[in-house]
Amino acid sequence: MKIVDFHCDTISQLYDIRESGENINLRKNRLHLDIEKMKKGDYMLQVFASYVDLGSNNKSLESCLSYIDLLYDEVEKNKDDIEIVYTYEDIIKNIKENKMSALLSIEEGGVCKGNLSLLRNFYRLGVRMMTLTWNYENELAYPNGYFYNKEKDERKGLKEKGFEFINEMEKLGMIIDVSHLSDDGIYDVYSNTTKPFIASHSNARSVCSHQRNLTDDMIKKIGDRGGIIGINFYSSFLNNNYKSSDISKIEDIINHIKYTSNIGGIDCVGIGSDFDGIDCPLEFENSSNMQLIYNEMKKSGFKESDIEKVFYKNSLRLFKELL
Ligand SMILES: [Zn+2]
């Protein structure tokens, strides 16, 4: 079963490991994801996030550009197997040529420093998806963990720049990603956009009450709009009883897929592994074993056509509409 995955942090990880002196590449490595594992796992497309931690990095723009450069360089060395895509047609071309696709995203809208010209230049560089925040407040918005302040009647959603950004992203054809955003921010995106948007790597809050997860109402609204929720494999986002050191289990991933599709419809569910951004052990170890999830979904009663939707068809529909 082909796979589209909306989120991994592999390129930032690769860059940082290289900086520490280890010789490591995207072809074959010790991380969750590399090209050989993707081939074994039957990948169609991986979204590679350029992830920057504003808390520890005061050169966020430079780092973001370096991670993107690393992806270009590594993909060029492996161009018989994978190519960077900018449009839906590029994805279809790769499928026909039996190649995998790499789509660029940014995880931390703060790298644009509130500057629309930087956003447009990132689009020109191939970025087709961006989270407005990671876990810090930035020029655009407040992240998860900031809730509406009842006493002061103060919303903690998008800032003025944030509204300008989502408007420009819709115009450009850059997919708005609300993972990591505050609850008020997600509603601001919903109320001020017309196209589908996504939560690339978030789960259902009714199943696991972590603030990074989505309420039923958010799931419904994303689904109604034609957007997608990529189910995250991080143990702390899967089950209230798990710590980050606990193993991520396929059973829990399937619970979130089931619940999210019951609330928002099967058309709004996708995969957002968060490979190489999560530090928990995984029952299926890494991206090469993604078919184990397929097998377990089949066993738990999912129809083949519904598994196809979750694994890649919903994502292709979204790319066709937005890219
Ligand atoms: Zn993340």
Image: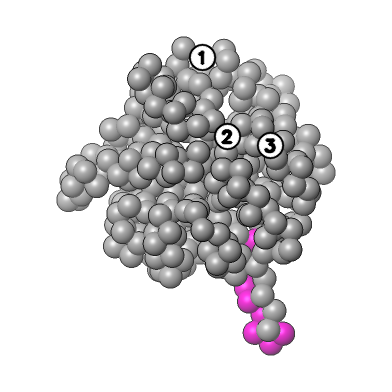
149 drawn magenta: yes
User: Nearest the camera: 56 or 272?
Assistant: 272
Give the image location of residue 164, x and y in percent: 70, 56
Direction from residue 138 to residue 268 in the image, left or right: left
Q: Which residue carries the number 1 mark?
A: 79
Q: First in sequence: mark 3 or mark 1?
A: 1
Q: Which residue carries the number 2 mark?
A: 104
Residue furthest bottom in the image: 151
In terms of secondary structure, where does tag 1 sit?
loop
Identity, as a three-letter code, of the amino acid under mark 1:
Lys
The answer to the question of whether label 2 and label 1 lie on touching residues, with beta carbons closer than 8 A, is no
Tag in front: 2 or 3: 3
Q: First in sequence: mark 2 or mark 3?
A: 2
Q: Report crowding for label 3: few under 14, some 14 to 19, many 20 or more residues within 10 A (C-alpha).
A: many
Residue under the image location 61 percent in, 31 percent down: 126
- The range drawn in magenta is 142-152
Q: Which residue carries the number 3 mark?
A: 122
In terms of secondary structure, where does tag 2 sit?
strand
